[in-house]
Image: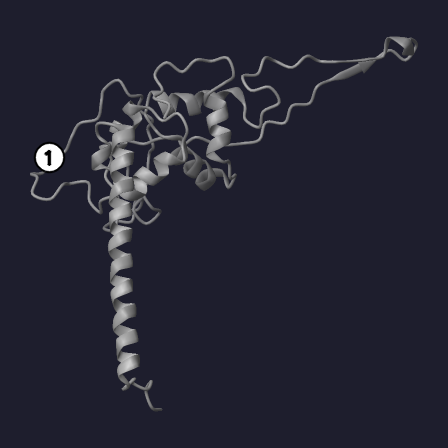
Amino acid sequence: MSGPSIPSSPADVALIEKLRNELQLAKLQIQVLEERLRRQRIAKYGQGSEKLSDEQLGLLELEPGVSNVEVKAESQRDPLPRSSGQRPGSKHPGRQSLPAHLPRVERILACTREQEVCQGCGKETVVIGYDESERLDVEPAKYFVEVTKREKRACVNCEEHGVVAAPLPPQIIDKGLASNPVVIDTVVQKYCDHLPLYRQSAILERDTGLELSRATLDGWVHIPGHVDRDSGAM
């Protein structure tokens, strides 16, 4: 197959050169606008935000009421997870002992059936001790759907008194989709762990498959009538 025809007329060459110059100018204008937008966002979010990438700054724009403390904490996060927990050039500190106050849960691994028999005489071997090691473990949060069934009662003889139902316990979000523990956990992660709502939204979708907008989570955090004194609303 023959390749595309190369223009040879002076008019075509001039047009291509003009379009090339316009494209280059457009790229420069985009770079200027992106830099201007970045500077505006850095001025908006204050100290620490200059360390954030353009993508992180863009995500912060999607979360209302983000505080300066959250921005500073976000700036200290690695942009990408490292393949190794050890930083390049750092010395290995050696095996670290686990905190003594953490509870210990023992898990005994039994020998295989072949190991329970002596390979020399064929008699059954006996346990003489254990090779013990420790690792930090965790029980991940387990999400589930709480189904509340309110008992309804009525008198079969006095219909005029109608039907009564068991009262609902107090809820942080009235008629909300989330239970009190889920709302409390969201608030704790935002203000104590400085985990932005857009990250929590992504984690919740990853762990449960439930897609909740950042606006919904923001409604959990900024309850009507509650004054957020620490929030740098911007």
Q: Is residue 234 left or right of residue 29?
A: right
User: Whole-percent x and y of residue 57?
Assistant: 31, 38
Q: Is residue 136 left or right of residue 229?
A: left
User: Whole-percent x and y of residue 152?
Assistant: 77, 17
Q: Residue at x 10, y 34 (%)?
A: 93
Q: Residue at x 28, y 43 (%)?
A: 54
Residue type at numbered disc 1: Gly
Badge 1 local density, few (<14 within 10 Å), some, or many (20+)? few
Q: Quadrant of the N terminus?
A: bottom left
Q: Is residue 142 left or right of residue 91?
A: right
* Element marked by disc 1: loop
Q: Nearer the viewer, residue 147 or 205?
A: 205
Q: Nearer the viewer, residue 31 or 131?
A: 31
Number of numbered labels in the structure image: 1
Q: Quadrant of residue 44?
A: top left
User: Whole-percent x and y of residue 208?
Assistant: 49, 38
- Asked which colour scheme the image uses, the reply is one colour
Q: Quadrant of residue 36?
A: top left
Q: Residue at x 45, y 39 (%)?
A: 207
Q: Indicate whether 148 appears above or below 58.
A: above
Q: Quadrant of the C terminus?
A: top left
Asked if residue 145 can be seen in this view, the reply is yes
Q: Which residue is mark 1?
A: 94
Q: Quadrant of residue 116?
A: top left
Q: In the orientation shown, which residue stands out farthest toward the front?
A: 11
Q: Indicate whether 11 appears above or below 74.
A: below
Q: Is residue 207 left or right of residue 132?
A: right
Q: Residue at x 33, y 91 (%)?
A: 2
Q: Nearer the viewer, residue 76 or 55?
A: 55
